[in-house]
Image (cartoon, grey):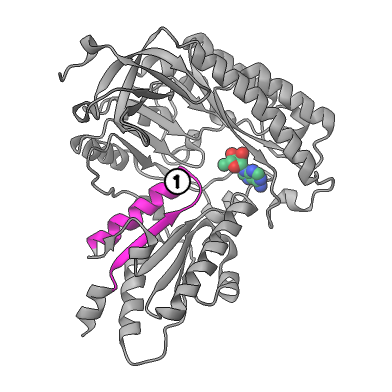
Amino acid sequence: MAFVFLFTMNRVFIKTYGCQMNERDSEQVASSLRGRGYSVVDNEFDADVVLLNTCSVRDQAEQKAIGKAGYLAKRKRTDPNFMIGVMGCMAQNRGDELVDRLPDLDLIVGTQKFHRVPDHLDNLIQTMSGEGPKPSTIVDLGEETDSQNTIKDHLPKKNQVSAFVSIMQGCNMNCAFCIVPKTRGRERARPMEQIVEEAHALAEQGVKEITLLGQIVTSYGRREFPVVGGKSPFVQLIEKINDVDGIERIRFTSPHPRGFKQDLVEAYRDVPKLCEYVHLPLQAGCDKTLRAMNRPYTKERYREIVESLRSIVPDMYISTDIIVGFPGETESDFNESAAFFEDIGFDMSYIFKYSIRTGTPAETMLDQISKEEKERRNQVLLDILHTRSLWRNEQLVGTVQEVLVEGPAKRGDKFVGKTRGYRNSIFDGDERLIGKLVEMKVERATVSTIYGDLVLAGVDTI
Ligand code: 5AD
């Protein structure tokens, strides 16, 4: 009986909100659930269990997940065996309060406990199949030594070209706006050999591109591993991944300007597989605001990093995160920030309207900025970004770019891939090209995409 019950309760759908780290954590949960005999399905209607892997960076992200959980809870009225879990940052941030607000939740799992999800589901299913009362919500939010080492398994996917590899967890910075130190805990690095082993395994499965993930990758292993030959542990790690046969491209996200030293700049010259693209969060282009945000660098230091990168790699692609409407940001502070943003010339940027986060240093700051003003500032930066990204993509028209082919494009019968500079590229392709590096002559550009034709001499498969 218990077996039959288990057998009919084993379809899980995981919905992920937020950053790449969350996507990676969800993949780990999916992989461990498969290992336990569950099937991971790709929509909520086919699922007996829905797990929401949540984000707390802005209020909007939390409200979305709370709304979704409330909506799913309705299904329990007609299907009492249906189960709902909340995992990740919002679970950690709101904890027990979530049970009060959403009493129908079966499972609440924090950011250091993803590996416990299969055990918890097994237990819930077993208890539900018994005669006793409905099990109460399982809440598992504690700290776990070495939890960083639990994010290591991947789901084998057909034709997978690119993979995320988590190299560390947590953040020791104290940015005034940010909830992450609370939700993700202190910095903990994974051992270098384990990461390199993971890269080898991915390469054997056909993966060609690896993106190293961490809250602040430039802090990777700085307490655990020594500097060798002037190179930080993070740069040593990049060099080791460069030696993995089969891996063609390396990316990472996100570095911090404070830890962005010359060894990392030079890696862009010396490490052939490291792509000429960096996502380097700026947050504000005004020293007064940076200080208020508790970001330990000046805009001139940021400029220096960008200039040293461009002096080594003239066509470096740079993207960023920037916040508008941080408390106390005056009109003239914003104008200074916007001028700097324009001056640097970003190829892509996430622009955030400041969102007040309970428990962060900025929560109690005076001079909160109105919603309308944040909206206005957001639009100013979007316009600057639009002009710049379009111009930059247009510069590529007529050139030949190396593209890593990912697969069919979402719409139409074209194929999609990326340049080393992370430009989305669309062209007429073929299934056999997936995972191959091809040459594309760029014919046309929009703000987000370049379009072109393959130069067949550069193709080694047909
Ligand atoms: N409000 C708005 N944006 C935020 N970010 C982090 N905290 C907040 C907040 N309270 C942005 C930062 C960070 C990105 C992931 O989210 O720009 O780099």
Name the residue furthest left: 462
Residue density around tag 1, few if under 14, some if 14–19, many if 20 or more, within 10 Å: some
Name the one closer to the observer, 226 or 314. 314
Please tell me whether residue 425 is drawn above or below residue 119 in the rendered image: above
Tell me if residue 32 is in the magenta stretch. Answer: yes
Magenta part of the chain: 9-35
Q: Is residue 29 left or right of residue 204?
A: right
Q: Is mark 1 within 8 Å of ligand 1?
A: no
For the point 28% across and 69% down, the residue is: 10
Q: Residue furthest front?
A: 412
Q: Position of residue 386 (x, y in %)?
A: 60, 24
Residue 205: % across, % down: 20, 38
Q: Is residue 240 visible to us here? A: no
Horizontal placement of 163 versus 84: left or right?
Answer: left
Above-or-below relation of 314 to 73:
above
Q: Which residue is mark 1?
A: 21
* Quadrant of the drawing holding the C terminus: top left
Q: Which amino acid type corresponds to the residue marked 1 in the rendered image?
A: Met
- The residue at 36%/77% (across/down) is 124
Badge 1 marks a residue whose secondary structure is helix
> As drawn, is 361 to the left or to the right of 242?
right
**Quadrant for ligand 1?**
top right
Residue 280 location (% of width, % of height): 55, 29
Q: Please tell me in which quadrant of the rendered image residue 442 appears.
A: top left
Residue 93 place in picture, x, y as percent: 58, 60
Give the residue at x 40% y 55%: 147
Query: Which one is in front, 341 or 218?
Result: 341
Indicate yes or no whether the magenta region holds residue 110: no
Residue 131 versus residue 171 in the image, above or below: below
Q: Left or right of 213: which side holds 439?
A: left
Q: Is residue 10 visible?
A: yes
